[in-house]
Image (tube, grey):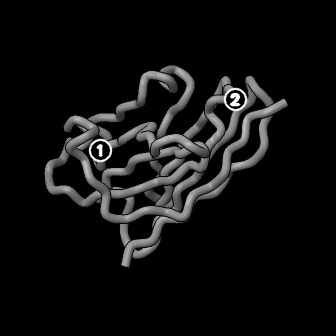
């Protein structure tokens, strides 16, 4: 059974940086399409990024383009999301999710057409002075 565990969330000042981790067990991140989502209180869950399993595509929602970067460490079986120039509106619980969809470049699909089978428990990011 695949399990995903996020970590790295904390309180950070505006303009600061954080790196979130999504560690996988029971499966190999090299075989997974990985997405990061976030949900703030009173708001709908939002897909922040999607990276196809072989790195063919990495998509970011407009509000984080140029500030967030996803990378994959196969040796550590972990996917990271480096977040820079953080803003208060980035505050949310961040989740990673995975798909084993057979299409290699799954993240090329429209986000509304992507589904994910496994989810982590989330990690809280708070951006505040």
What secondary structure is marked by label 2? helix
Farthest bottom residue in view: 1
Q: Which mark is residue 80?
A: none
Ranked by sequence position, the earlier of labels 1 and 2 is: 1
Residue for point 45% across, 71% down: 3
Q: Quadrant of residue 83?
A: top right
Name the residue carrying label 1: 52
Residue for point 38% across, 59% down: 29
Q: Which mark is residue 88?
A: 2
The spot of residue 76 in percent (x, y) is 52, 60
Farthest left residue in view: 103
The C terminus sits in image quarter: top right
Residue for point 18% across, 47% down: 104
Residue closest to the eye, 109 or 33:
109
What secondary structure is marked by label 1? loop
Estimate the spatial distance between the alpha carbons at disc 1 and disc 2, rounded to whole Å. Answer: 28 Å
Q: Judge left or right: residue 26 versus residue 6.
A: left
Above or below: residue 66 compared with residue 24: above
Residue closest to the eye, 125 or 30:
125
The spot of residue 57 in percent (x, y) is 29, 35
């Amino acid at each position: 059974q695949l399990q995903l565990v996020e970590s790295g969330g904390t309180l950070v000042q505006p303009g600061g940086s954080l790196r979130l981790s999504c560690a996988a067990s029971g499966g190999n991140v090299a075989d997974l399409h990985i997405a990061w989502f976030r949900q703030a209180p009173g708001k709908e869950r939002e897909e922040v990024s999607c990276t196809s399993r072989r790195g063919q595509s990495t998509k970011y929602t407009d509000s984080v383009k140029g500030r967030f970067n996803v990378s994959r460490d196969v040796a550590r079986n972990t996917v990271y999301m480096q977040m820079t120039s953080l803003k208060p509106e980035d505050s949310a619980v961040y989740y990673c999710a995975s798909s084993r969809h057979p299409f290699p470049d799954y993240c090329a699909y429209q986000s509304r057409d992507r589904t994910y089978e496994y989810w982590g428990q989330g990690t809280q990011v708070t951006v505040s002075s």
